[in-house]
Amino acid sequence: MTLPAQPGIIDGVPAVARYVFFSIADQGAHRGADAQAIKDALGRLSPLVNGSDVVLGIGPTLAAALGAEVPGLHELPDFSSQYVKVPSTPGTIWCWVRGDDLGELLHLTRKVQKALAPVFTVRHVVDAFRHALGDSGHGRDLTGYEDGTENPTGEAAEQAAFAQGLGPGLDGSSFVAVQQWVHDLDAFEALGDDEANQHFGRDRKTNEELDDSPEWAHVKRTAQESFEPPAFMLRRSMPWMTGMEAGLLFVAFGRSLDAFEAQMRRMAGHDDGVVDAMFRISRPVNGACFWCPPMQDGRLDLRQLGC
């Protein structure tokens, strides 16, 4: 990759990961932390973020707190419709902590937490994992369907995922949409094989797209080339579980948020009243958007934030 991007974005999903969401502390002496305190915290964090073991995302509220403007960065709209709920839960800092040993990720998460304290506090953590890795290199959702089949590759992936031609401090950066979906596995398991395939628009065993799938099939609703302009993005979703609750941590990187928002509008039925069948077996419980800064000489390039 020639772009100065955080490499973990293009590298694909790891064996295990933690999605860690931080908020600005709002109690005690650090209520309403000033810009310098925030910059100091980011300075302590920066050596831990190599863009591979830890991928960093900055939320709109944090950019605003620093008096910085990142063109195209905004909060995730609430895409709820008369048919479904699609909540927006704004975030401040998002870290995708990646590796192959969950214990090591715990220790790395603690280092990140201590670097950001006391200005930032952990709001939410989701532990995720790669499931049923196949010959294609893609894992599967907990429903058994391959995830990431339609991802662009090579140069097309870089064009979809990263900003280019905007100048230093922006080139190589990426926007990411993050949503936690909770699966109703009982509802899914109640489906027969054919009905489940119709929901997804693919054959679960062969991964082949079904020509006769209904208009509400997930593949039909989200076909990237069916949008104008085409809505290509780079998905890096992973299954998660806590106790007996489980689902998919949906993560999509783009050179802007346009592609994700176009797909989400259509899924929720805003375009034509047809709701994606995914909502019959799963539901999003949170969602936020972040900006992933580029890299420079192996370190985060935070000049756009004035750091």
Image (spheres, grey):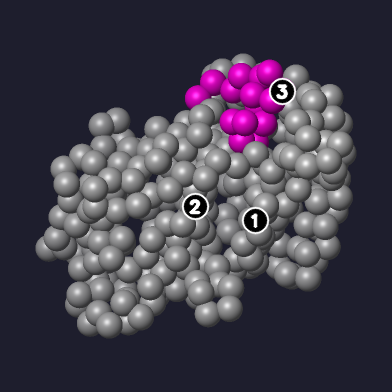
Q: Nearer the viewer, residue 242 or 224?
A: 242
Judge left or right: residue 292 versus residue 222: right
x, y percentage for residue 212? 12, 63
x, y percentage for residue 75? 50, 34
Check disc 1 and give the amino acid type. His
- Quarter of the image with the N terminus is top right
- Quarter holding residue 46: top right
Which residues are the magenta region? Answer: 58-72
- Quarter of the image with the C terminus is top right
Question: In the rendered image of this protein, does residue 198 appear above or below residue 65?
Answer: below
Q: Nearer the viewer, residue 156 or 173?
A: 173
Q: Going 53% across and 80% down the picture, which residue do you hit?
A: 244
Badge 3 marks a residue whose secondary structure is: loop
Q: Residues within 10 Å of mark 1 (few under 14, many from 20)?
A: few
Asked if marks 1 and 2 touch (Cβ < 8 Å), the reply is yes
- Quarter holding residue 169: top right
Of mark 2 and mark 3, the one earlier in the sequence is: 3
Determine if the magenta segment contains residue 189.
no
Residue carrying label 3:
66
x, y percentage for residue 217? 22, 60
Determine if the magenta segment contains residue 66.
yes
Residue carrying label 2:
286
Residue 135 seen in render: no
